[in-house]
Amino acid sequence: MRGAAAIAGVTRNAVLAALLSCAVPVAAQVADPYAAARRALLVELQSQARADTDTPAHIDREVLDVLGRVPRHAYVPAAQRRYAYDNRPLAIGYGQTISQPYIVALMTSLARPRAGQKILEVGTGSGYQAAVLAEFGAQVHTIEIVAPLATQAAQRLRPYRNIATRSADGYYGWKEQAPFDAIVVTAAASSIPPPLVAQLKPGGRMVIPVGSSFFTQTLLLVEKQADGRMRTRQILPVRFVPLTGAH
């Protein structure tokens, strides 16, 4: 994923104390050196989810359960693995990042992935967001414009039979696989790309950051009505790397 961080930071207040009193579902692992860090991250996100229950930035409990199963450290470069469960973006090379876990959780919650759906991701990056979406049983089609990252992600995602990868300009979507129940864009566009709007199914949801490159952008939830009209809602300010390509 070409990632981002929320402008409003998420703190780790009383994480250690919370760990002693709050059980968070995490896949059982033997001698997992990342287990404690993963639990701490989930406690932090769970706390944020409780705080955001009545806001557009709500995080679903089911999404937190999935983040507990997907090993974020497997989607970052070896030199960054000790930071894999920090709640912040990390560099993955080629000027790209893996998004802050809070942003991954939020975008996933907004997309509402479900088993049997077809979902498009624009900006595969390391493959982490695609893996999270696939855990819901959706068929995920993910596009990455940076060829080396696309190759690396395809290798990491090979165990997922419900993920298809492609190296291409995601601005134009994946027309032959459309329409999509949901579209998740993990790089900032200056405006909502018309090809993606056209490939979104009526009743579908698109989550996309929109704004100027390397400045504060706005995370949008775009819903396509049954009559084809679009309803857009602003969620929160974010910073993503720009959506690149010849468009």
Image (cartoon, helix red, strand yellow):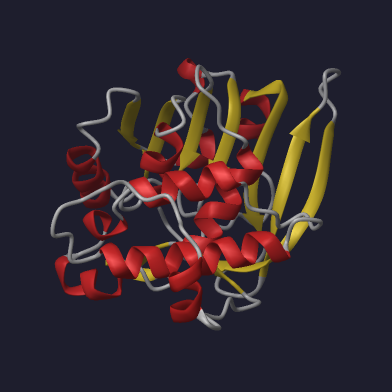
* Residue 237 position within the rendered picture, expressed as x and y whole percent measured from the top left: 69, 68
Quadrant in the picture for residue 99? bottom left
Q: At which x and y percent is residue 162?
A: 34, 23
Which of the pair 203/68 is nearer the observer?
68
Q: Is residue 80 left or right of residue 42?
A: left
Which of the two residues, 9 or 146, is positioned nearer the viewer here? 9
Q: Determine the residue positioned at 20% across, 32% down.
A: 158
Q: Position of residue 134 (x, y in %)?
A: 40, 32
| Location of residue 233 in the rendering, given as x and y in whole percent from the top left corner | 81, 49
| x 50%, y 32%: residue | 120
The residue drawn where x is 35% and y is 63% is 38
| Total labels drawn | 0
Asked whether residue 29 is in view, the answer is: yes
The answer to whether 65 appears left or right of 162 in the picture is right
Q: Is residue 138 left or right of residue 204?
A: left
Above or below, 196 relative to 118:
below
> Which residue is pictured at 31% across the width and 46% down the height?
27
For residue 193, which quarter of the picture?
top right
Judging depth in this view, the residue of 111 and 64 nearest the camera is 64
